[in-house]
Image (cartoon, helix red, strand yellow):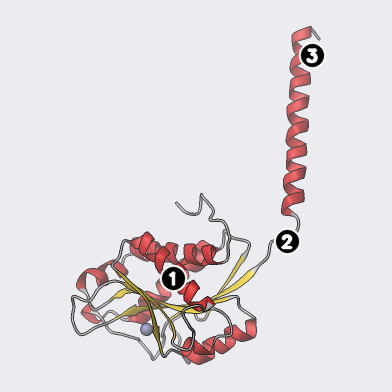
Amino acid sequence: MNRNVKLLALFVAIIAGGALLLAGITRLHASPALPQYTVVIDPGHGGKDPGAIGVGGLKEKTITLAIAKIVYIKSLVYPQLHVVLTRRTDTYSFPTDRVIAANKLGAALYVSIHANAYTSPTATGVETLISETRGLHSKSYHLAEILQQHVIAATDAHNRGVQMEPLFIRRAQMPAALVETGFITNPHEARLLQSISYQSKVADGILAGILAYLHIPQNAVAAH
Ligand SMILES: [Zn+2]
């Protein structure tokens, strides 16, 4: 070997050694199991309960399931998240039973997905609700604020803020919020909510809110 070849061999050996060391360090850092959070996502309504009926007979239960499934799929790149859907098909179960099931799972969060309706077709925007039994300083309120902020950022929808109402999620033993993703009685929002691209934006916002609440860094690749 001439001098140049020897130097090259040495250089390659150093780089390879460094890469192996780095891989080892990375594995060492990655090896302690990441904390895993069970997050229950509840596609509102289903089966015999269509929820609100919107423009052209659009059913709330269809929109909520579509968005929830996208949240589930997008969550799969986060090993720290174990997302459980309360329904995967067009089936009915009593809302409170869904919350009780989440309690039994020991879920970290409960996020119910809905779509709004109003007598006036001009009503528009996104709002996040919590049970009136939880206060302004509750974890549910904090979760709702973060969800609302991220869904608005992802969709550019009109911001209706966080509201407190008598809701079935009062039975949740974990922070719980209900996202009203838009008005299916508003022709513009009804059209948006039926498009996969907008459903995906809403799902991005919900997932980003969940990640932010749990202090899980957002995966740069998954975010785009
Ligand atoms: Zn609903």
Which residue occupies 20% across, 72% down? 187
Which residue occupies 77% across, 26% down? 14
* Residue 9 percent location from the top left of the image: 77, 19
Question: Can you tell me whether the CB of the residue at mark 2 lies under 8 Å from the nearest atom of ligand 1?
Answer: no
Q: Which residue lies furthest to the front in this view?
A: 137
State the residue position of label 3. 6
State the residue position of label 2. 33
Q: Is residue 22 left or right of residue 110?
A: right
* Residue 2 percent location from the top left of the image: 79, 7
Q: Which amino acid lies under the numbered mark 3 shown in the image of this protein? A: Lys
Q: For the residue carrying disc 2, how many other residues have a C-alpha within 10 Å: few (<14), some (14-19), or many (20+)?
A: few
Q: Which of label 1 and label 3 is nearer to you?
A: 1
Q: Which amino acid lies under the numbered mark 2 shown in the image of this protein? A: Ala
Residue 22 lies in quadrant? top right
State the residue position of label 1. 145
Q: Is residue 25 above or below residue 72?
A: above
Residue 117 visible from this viewpoint: yes
